[in-house]
Amino acid sequence: MLGHDLNNVLQAAAAAIGLALQGGRLGPADSALLDVAGQALQQGAGMARLFLGQDIPRPCSSDGVDLAELVQEMAPLLRHAVAPALQLELDACALSGRVQVDRSALQRALVNLALNAREACAPGARLRISTDTCTLVVARPGRIPGRYGIVRVADNGPGIDPAVAARVFEPGASSRGPGRGLGLAQVRAAVEASGGFVDVQSSPRRGTCFLLALPSTIA
């Protein structure tokens, strides 16, 4: 209920700003400031809608989700989530294709990873989100051979100790104070619900890379 109330407040504030801009009685400088405020409110409302989604994954769309398209569409939201602390780089490869996953759950997972990077890294650090493909030939526990679309979320921050990285996806776990552990259980749940898997590669002072592998709609 609190989340819905927050979303309603943000939408009302954005609507009020829109009416003020349409009135035509503001100077150019004030109009520009209100326009920036309105965009920020819309992005905040978008984040609220993402986190209002149920934790139980919904059925995946039959035609799948275009990974590159989703990352590109989320660019304003992701930049808002990490700015001004981190430098965000996006590399959405069209060849990553379509994958089987609940769209809203994947959006929440990417925002969670971006927020955790922001909390864990020093100001000025770099966060890179890229898409790609891979083919798993040999079966492993929890991993079925086949083609996968890949999302990598990598930073050049302080990294995670190996002992901590082994349990970083546990609910409530955290690698070092704030950050990393927040929302990472949701990331793994969203990916595994689609039949995919998550890897984390990190070491102290060498940054962290989360790899999300999602089953391709192409056999």
Image (cartoon, helix red, strand yellow):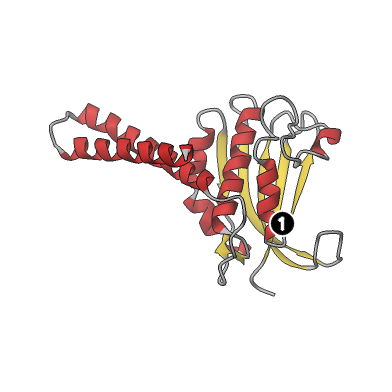
Outermost residue toward the front in this view: 1
Q: Residues within 10 Å of mark 1 (few under 14, many from 20)?
A: many
Q: Where is residue 195 drawn, in percent x and y?
A: 72, 62
Q: How many marks?
A: 1
Front in this rendered view, residue 22 or 52? 52
- Could you tell me which residue is drawn at 37 percent across and 37 percent down? 10
Q: In the rendered image, which residue does mark 1 sit on?
A: 192
Q: Where is residue 130 drawn, in percent x and y?
A: 62, 50
- Could you tell me which residue is drawn at 31 percent across and 35 percent down? 13
Front in this rendered view, residue 219 or 112? 112
- Vertically, is 177 above or below 216? above
Q: Is residue 210 left or right of residue 137?
A: left
- Could you tell me which residue is drawn at 81 percent across and 39 percent down? 167
Q: Is residue 55 left or right of residue 198?
A: left
Q: Amino acid at mark 1?
A: Glu
Please identify the quarter of the rendering in which residue 175 is found.
Answer: top right
Q: Is residue 174 left or right of residue 94?
A: right
- Vertically, is 216 above or below 89? below
Front in this rendered view, residue 182 or 39? 182
Say what secondary structure mark 1 lies in.
Answer: helix
Front in this rendered view, residue 24 or 61? 61
Q: Is residue 117 visible?
A: yes
Q: Where is residue 138 drawn, in percent x and y?
A: 86, 66
- Vertically, is 53 above or below 58? above
In the rendered image, the quadrant that contains the C terminus is bottom right
- Could you tell me which residue is drawn at 76 percent across and 44 percent down? 200
Q: Is residue 213 visible?
A: no
